[in-house]
Amino acid sequence: MSISSRMSGTVEEALDLTNRLLRTDPARAAAQAREILAVDRFNADAHRLLGRALRATGDAEGAARAELGAISASTRDPMLVEAATALLDGKLAVAEHILRPRLKANPFDVAAIRMMAELAGRLERYADAENLLRRALELAPAFAAARSNLATVLYRQNRHGEAIAELDTLLDDDPENPAHSNLKAAALGRVGSYEEAIGLYEAVLARVERQPKIWMSYGHVLKTVGRQADGIAAYRRAIEMRPQLGEVWWSLANLKTVKLDDGDVATMGRALEDESIGEDDRFHLHFALGKALEDAEQTEQAFAHYKEGNRLRRESIDYDRQEITGLVDRSIALFTPEFLEARTGQGCPVPDPIFILGMPRAGSTLIEQILSSHPLIEGTQELPDISQMARRLSGRKLKSDDSAYPQEIAALDPQTLRALGEEYLERTRIQRKTDRPYFIDKMPNNWAHSGLIHLILPNARIIDARRHPLDCCFSNFKQHFARGQGFTYDLDDLGRYYADYVRLMTHIDGVLPGRVHRVFHEAMIEDTEAQVRALLDHVGVAFDPACLRFWENDRAVRTASSEQVRRPINREGVDQWRRFEPWLSPLKHSLGPVLERYPDSPF
């Protein structure tokens, strides 16, 4: 008896019968799902059942059509429309309240799974988002939107090679999709494939020219490879198309070597008066105006814009100053001489990595440029792998959870410590483009994980880049970071963070004498050759004169100091805080003895 003769019952009953039949006779289940759809063509459950049945019979193409039909039908579902509206409005709790029971009742609802993944991504729970998106693609491999979301989630987890693989799959089916090409180009830049990224951006812009954000991204990679004039031209094209795009104004100002003129200042001022612009554009404009007005020696107005840009940015992030203080406290308690002595000889013995760490804006890019001018040392970029390992060891699922890091290190046996070192080397291999025996990881925040680095890579070199507290902290206050430096948007937070950094590094000096080589930025400026010789001696390589001509090195540089390190050493960045001293009392107060005793430590 066909299902149509039984449709006098409810559709739910018919679906239940089809679902049971799926387990024993998928071909008949497919036929019956089609009969339901003949009566109710927008029934998402019937489309899903048809997809599962066809996949079970080996009809992958038909299954893909049915699976996508289910997703399309779901757009008419009032419950999912309500959840989508809540996500669009930023009402994440409302969306979760709708989606959780929906998925409990129907775990095969791919559209709902993707929405839940978007919710997790908004909360920066990227591992959860990834798992959900992989489940969605398991159920509907042709669901391009879910694959695109997965590529984005992988990119945000700094798993750029995997993101590129997903994007290649998408571009095979839709080769001219500008969004996929744009993200792939950004990911290529992250793994150092800059020329390929440039080619991809150029191909996209040849097809869809009026894309200001893509022009901006194109400008970023041109700047990175040293094509400054071309990068500026790309930024200017973006501004012509969208003068309110705050990020491109900041990108232009952030070159440090470009001075924005009165016309630029007027254009940015008009953009700020536009009430329709978003907060992201607004705070970027404030940072850019601060830099332009500082260059014009309008100090009070410049500080007002820096202060407002920082206030807006601070309000948009969840930064807890006590978190880093607690991490430092726990690290000092764990890394005792006895603890470290008991683990001597453990970890991965490979000497390849050179870690340059410390505060951002402390001269680390200069040190990297000097070292990477040596024929035995390769410069890469700021690598996130150590901090990701630390996050994994912490055991935290949510930001509110207690952290088991670094105490969890005490439970790691020698085999695990070695495996972690080997994992780091494997994960960073994608960044290495030459056969030079040493490579640099200049993620500044790795200072907080110097104990972990020592234990898993005992023969790696560690270099601490340090700069005068007021020069360093105020330079951070003027800098807008894309992500990861939440302490920089408040003068009090900055001072506390700097003091915590000095406190931990002083402890490391005490328990591991000589393990860390410190480079004071002021000393590097005053006696460059002596400092470079000492630096190379610590790394264990012979002096090479090329290291003194580091500005001739044409390597790609991603950081905010990219243009500065393409010139000989100069004193431009020294004492810039002095003009702004009237407004720096909160910073001085939070630095306390660290400021008074510099370059010595009060701890």
Image (cartoon, rainbow, N blue to C red):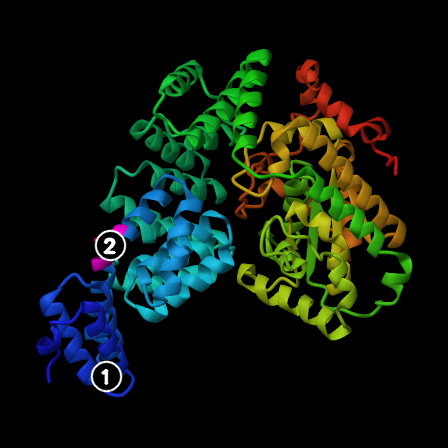
Q: Which residues are magenta?
A: 72-78
The image quadrant that residue 396 belongs to is: bottom right
Which amino acid does the dot numbered 2 rest on?
Asp
Look at the image and say whether residue 36 sits in the magenta stretch.
Answer: no
Could you tell me which quadrant the C terminus lies in? Answer: top right
- The image shows residue 488, relative to residue 286, as above or below, that is below
Eyeballing the image, is 536 above or below 294?
Answer: below
Q: Residues within 10 Å of mark 2 (few under 14, many from 20)?
A: few
Q: Position of residue 455 (x, y in %)?
A: 77, 63
Quadrant position of residue 349: bottom right
Q: Amino acid at mark 1?
A: Pro
Q: Find disc 1 in the rendering and name its residue.
A: 26
Image coords of residue 56 (percent x, y):
27, 82
Residue 525 picture location, percent across and down: 73, 33
Determine the residue located farthest toward the bottom in the rendered image: 24
Q: CA distance from mark 2 to mark 1?
A: 26 Å
Relative to residue 46, is residue 576 drawn left or right?
Answer: right
Label at residue 77: 2
In screen coordinates, is 322 left or right of 506? left
Camera-near label (2 vs 1) is: 2
Residue 32, placed above or below residue 128: below
Residue 501, can we see it? yes
Residue visible at 49% across and 25% down in the picture = 288
In the rendered image, which quarter is residue 494 located in?
Answer: top right
- What element does badge 2 sit on? loop
Q: Is residue 338 left or right of residue 502?
A: right
Which one is in front, 310 or 508? 310
